[in-house]
Amino acid sequence: MPERPRTLVYKSLSKLFLLLPKRGTRKVPVYRTLYPSLYESMWSFWPPDNILEVQGSKMLLEVFHQNPTLQNTFRAYALFRIHEKNTTKLFRKVLRPGNTFLDLGANVGYFSLLAARLVGKTGKVFSFEPEPTNFRYLTENLRINGYEQVRPEQKAVSDSPGLVKLYICPYDSGHHTINQPEGIRSYRPEYDYRQEQFIEVEKVRLDDRFPDLRVDAIKMDVEGAELLALAGMDRLIRRQENLRMFVEFFPLLIRDMGGSPEEFVRRLLEDYGFSAFVIGGDYSTPPEIGNRKYFRVKQAGDLLRLCQGKNDHLNLFLKKGRDQDRLS
């Protein structure tokens, strides 16, 4: 079957799969058969070049990858064709043509690709991803889209230059972390960590890397190393008058990195003067947020109370400068 029809069949089957109810299906005999059968059959129509459009950009998605963590990552992108839905929607509203964007923890490039489309050829995107396999997919995704406005760097952002250990997560290709592996262990303690793996990677201090750069927006998802990253870009943040940030807030990982979630939030709100909004619907959504897509928090204690469970984590939108008390 030619590639184009295969892609259309795959998209149709994946849409049908997503329409099926997810809860209570084990009690209905037809769903016990239909649900897994449809999931497996739709992959037989997967395009042979492993490329699918996701949020307007082409992505290389090797859905039969021999590494199960990468396979899960690629299948999630292929099936849903969106990552962190409400964060993505807000991201699209924030970035403008000609903007400069920093992607800290770029993984295979979802937000870097989206940013490249939004800032256009007159904008700039700097993408930092230390893990070699993720970095290879990031650079390949940029190549197949021809996004020359994106500059990928295989480095970890931290508080000092040099080399650092990057611990490889056995269960999630987006959960590798620098310095110490306690966060990996704590989040999924059921795994066997006796053969713990790590590699040495280069780290960079962003105040050194960008001494004069004007930055419009930053996405930071660095798996517990947020306080280290903040320390390394203190001057960069302070000199940006209208900076926007998208930050994953995961108290467990920050604590297991040896930091304080309370201090992290305090610095954002008090030292840098950000207004903070929880993005509802992505990851943990506490009852206080309900069905709201965005929820304003004014102090560290308010935010910590939204993360009562051990593994609770949230996406934050941070804003300073013009109209900073309003989301849009």
Image (spheres, grey):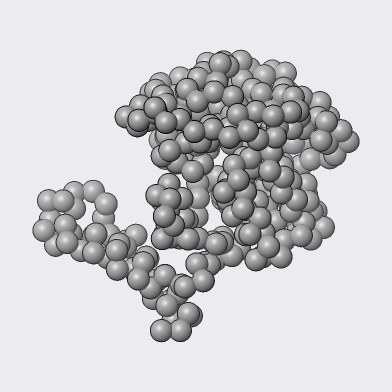
| Residue for point 58% across, 16% down | 259
**Count of residue discs:** 0
Residues 108 and 300: in front is 108
Is residue 154 positioned above or below 226 on the image? Answer: below
Please tell me in which quadrant of the rendered image residue 128 appears.
Answer: top right
Outermost residue, front direction?
195
Residue 246, image quadrant: top right
In the rendered view, would you say 99 is above or below 305?
A: below
Instruction: Evaluate whether residue 175 shows in this view.
Output: yes
Nearer to us in this view, 303 or 44: 44
* Residue 145 in picture, x, y percent from top left: 66, 65
> Residue at point 59% right, 55% down?
137
Q: Quadrant of the N terminus?
A: bottom left
The answer to whether 126 is drawn above or below residue 58 in the figure is: above
Which x, y percent locates residue 264? Answer: 61, 20
In the rendering, at what x and y percent does residue 307 appear? 44, 24
Instruction: Write the residue at 81% across / 35% down.
Output: 209
Viewer-side residue, 186 vs 292: 186
Whether 92 is drawn above or below 191: the answer is below
- Image quadrant where one finds the C terminus: top right
Q: Is residue 219 visible?
A: no
Among the 4 quarters of the image, the one containing residue 163 = top right
Please report the residue visible at 68 percent of the width from the left and 43 percent of the height from the top: 154
- Residue 317: % across, % down: 61, 36
